[in-house]
Amino acid sequence: MKIHQILILIALIFIVSGVDLRAQAPDAVPNRARDISTTQPRTPKNTSSFLGTDLPLFDPASEMISWDGKAWDINNNRILKARFEKYLNTPPENSNSDRAYHELIETILQKLSPENYNTKSIESARALLSSASQYPSDAGLCGTIAQAIFTVSLSKKEQRNLIEANEELERERKAHEWNLKIEESRTTINPHGAKKTSGKSSTLTEQEVEPQNKAPESSSIAKRLAEVELLMAANKSKKAVSEVQSKVEFQELIVQLFLQRRFQHVIIASRFYRHIFGDGDTTIKASEFQTQSLRSAGIPEINPPSTLGTFESLAHEAIRDVHEGVCACQYLLDSNQLESASKRLAEAYLVGEFMPEIQTLPIELKQRCLEFTKKANQLISALQVKDFSLAEELVNDLKNTAKDFDSSKQVAIIETAKTVSKMHLQAAKNAAVSGNKDVLEKELHAATEIWPQNPDLKQVSNVIFSQADVQESALVDLDQLISQHNYRQIFNDKLRFIAATVLDPKRQEKLVAVLEKMEKVETAILKSNERVKQGDFSGAWETLERVYEEIPDDSKLNELRGNMSSEAAEFVKALRMGQQLEEKNQVGSSLAWFLKAQELYPPSDFAKEGISRIVKKVLPDA
Amino acid sequence: MLRKANSSVQFGWRLFTVLIILSIGAIGYAVLGIIQDPYRTIPELDTTIYFENSNSIRGNTYKASAVIQNSLAWSRTSGRLFSVSLSTNTGSILLPILVPSSLNHVNVQKGQKYRLVVQVDSMGILRVQQMEKV
C-alpha cells in the first residue's frame, strides 16, 4: 500500500506541476517552493524514512492527500478529473503502429533482461532504441536514452584519452626525475669545479665551459617535473569528474523517466546503466539538479532512493499495480460495479498513464466508466454548490446504474440540509407571523445558505413578501374605511382585514368592534327578510330600525329599512309621530300615537317602549 | 176595474202613515236623547286636534263616549291609566284617559262603554272628571 501511495503521489505531483521537470531549471523554481526551502523553519528530518517526514499524507478513508496544511481530494481535483475524462474519451491505441511499438519495447526489455544479458544482446537492444523512438507513443524517450548512452561512450573515450595522456606524462616524469637525480649527484661529488679531477667527457666539457649554468639546469628539470606532475593530477581529476558527471547525467535521466511514469523506460535505462558503468556502483549521486527538480515538484529536501535498484523495483511494482488495476476494473465492470471500477481505473491511470494496459483499454469499457464518472463529478459539483435537488436526482440515477454506489454519505448530506433548511423556513414563517423581522431575515438567510436552490424557499419568500405587501395595503384600506364608516366594505373583506390585523392589536380591536356591529346588521337583515316572507312588514321594519339606531351608516340596512318603511307606512308614521311629540313633551298626543302604533302592530317593541316611557311620566309612582 | 183603483190608493195611504209614524218616533227618540244627555252642554272631544297637539287644548273639558280597551298603569295616589276606543267619522281610535283616584270606586273593565267628561291636563292627558256607564 505504501508503494502504491507513493506512486500515486508522484503521479499527482507530476500532473499538478503540469510541466516537464527539466524545464524547471533553478531559475524557474516557483517562489513558493523557494520560500519553503529557504525561509520556513524546519524541524530535523528523519532521513532514514523514504522521502523524509515531509511526505504528504494520503488518507485512504477520505481519499484525501494532506500536505503543508492543504488537502486535495484525489477524486475531486479539477486537473485530475480533466485528464481522466480526456483519457476516457480517447480511443484505444490499437493501431498497427501502436502494437508494433509495444512489441518493440517488449523486445528491448527481453534483450536487456538478466537471463539474456550479454554484449551482443545489449548492442542489439541499443540498436532498437532508435527504432522505438520513431513511434509517436514513445515521445522520443528511447532516443533520449540512446543519446545518453552515446554521451557516456564519448565520456568514456575522453577518459581513455586522459589515461593515455597520463601514461605519456608518467614516462616523461620518470625521465625528468632521472635527469634530476644525475644532476644532483654530480653537484654533490665536485661542488667547486670538475676540470681538476676529470676532464674528458662531454659533460665535463660543458661543465668546464659553462660552470655558472649548472644550477639553472637543475632547476629547469625540477620545474618541468613539477609541471608534469601537475598535469597528471589534473588529468586524474578530469577523469574522475567526467566519470561522475556521466553517471549523474544518466541517473538524472532515469529519475526523470520515473517521475514521468515511463516505467518501462526506467527499466530499460537502468539496465543500460548497469552495462555501461560496469563497476557495480549503482548508488544514486543526487545532484543539485535532482534536488531542485524534486523541490520544484513540491517535495523539498527529500532523500531520493539510494540506488537504481530501488527505482527499478518501484517501476516493476508500478507496472504490476497498473496491470492489476486494469484487471480489477474489467471484472468490476462485468459485475456492474461502476463506482469501484471507475476508482480502480482512475488509480491505475494516475500511476500508469503510459502503460500499454491503460492505453489499449477498449473504449466501451471506458465509456461506461465515463458515464459514471461524469455523473459522480456532477454530483460532487451539485453538493458543492448545494443544489440538493439535482444532487438527489443524481444519487438516484447513480444508485440505479451502479449497484455498488454507496449513497449513504450523499443522502445524509442531502437529507440533513433539507431538514435544516425546512426548519429555518418554518422558523422564518413563524417570525413572519409574529412580525419579528430580525428573526425572519436571519432565518431566511440561514435557510438560503444551507439550500440556495430550495424550491420552498422561493415559494415561502414570495408568500411572506407578498403577504407583507397585501398586509400593508389592507391596513391602509381598513383605516380609510373606518374613517368613512364604510363598515359594509370592511365586512365584505373581513377575511383580508382579519389576516392583516393579526400583527396590529389596535387595529384588530377596531376591526372586531366593526365586525360585531356588522354581525348585528346582518342578523337584523336576516330576521327582517324572514319576517317579510311572513308578510310582517312592520316587524321587519322594526327589526331593521332597532339596528339602525346603533349603526345608521350601513347602506344595505338603510336600503332595506327604506323599503320596509313604505311597506309599513302607517305604523311607521304612528311611531314617528309618537316619538316626535314625545320629544316636544306632548305627552298626551305622543301616547295617543304610540297607542295607535300598538293598535296597528301589537307586538311592536317601539310602541311598548314609547307607551312605557310616557306612562312613567304620567304616573311616576306606577 | 173600480176595485183595482181603490186598493192602490189604500196602499199609498198606509205607507205614508207608517213613514209619518216612524218619523215622529225618530224625532221623539232624538229629542228624548238630547233631553236625557246630562253633558249636552259640553263639547265633544276633537280627536284630530288632540292627536296633533294636545298641549294646545290643555285645561279644556270635553265629553266623549268611549269603550275601555286596556289598563296601561295604576297608581294608588294618581289613579288609573286606560286606553279607550273612540268612534270617529274615520273609524275608531285609541286614546289614553286617566281615571283619577277619586273615581276609584268605579269598576272599570275592558269592553265597558262610558260616557265621559274629560279635561286635558297640564301634560295633555285626558283626565276623567265624570264617567257614566252607558
Image (spheres, coloured by chain):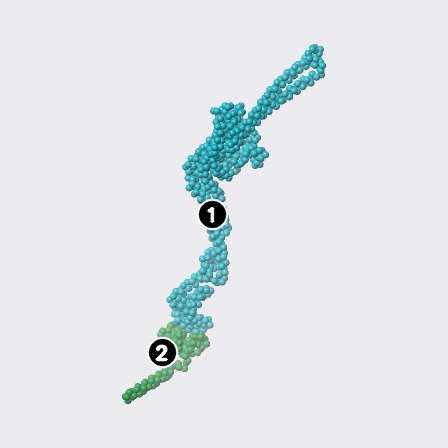
Q: Colour of chain A?
A: cyan
Chain name for mark 1: A
Relative image position of residue A21 (x, y in whole percent): 55, 33
- Picture layout, residue A66 above or below residue A546: above
Regarding residue A551, the answer to whether it shows in the image is: no
Classify 10 Å Cα crowding around label 2: few (below 14), some (14-19), many (20 and above). few
Relative image position of residue A384 (x, y in whole percent): 49, 43
Regarding residue A560, the answer to whether it shows in the image is: yes
Respond whether the residues carrying marks 2 and 1 are from the same subunit.
Answer: no
- Which residue type carries mark 1? Asn
Question: What is the number of the mark on residue B134?
Answer: 2
Foreground mark, 2 or 1, reads: 1
Question: What is the number of the mark on residue A454?
Answer: 1
C-alpha separation, residue under disc 2 versus residue under disc 1: 99 Å
Classify 10 Å Cα crowding around label 1: few (below 14), some (14-19), many (20 and above). some
Report the quarter where the N terminus of chain B lies.
bottom left
Chain name for mark 2: B
Query: A220 or A612, which is in the foreground?
Result: A220
Residue displayed at 48% across by 24% down: A116
Q: Looking at the image, which residue sits at the far front?
A: A96
Confirm or deny contact between disc 2 and disc 1 (CB under 8 A).
Answer: no
Report the quarter where the C terminus of chain B lies.
bottom left
- Picture layout, residue B62 above or below residue A249: below
- Which residue type carries mark 2? Val
Relative image position of residue A536 (x, y in whole percent): 39, 68
Identify the chain drawn in green: B
Question: What is the number of the mark on residue A49?
Answer: none
Q: Looking at the image, which residue sits at the far bottom?
A: B2
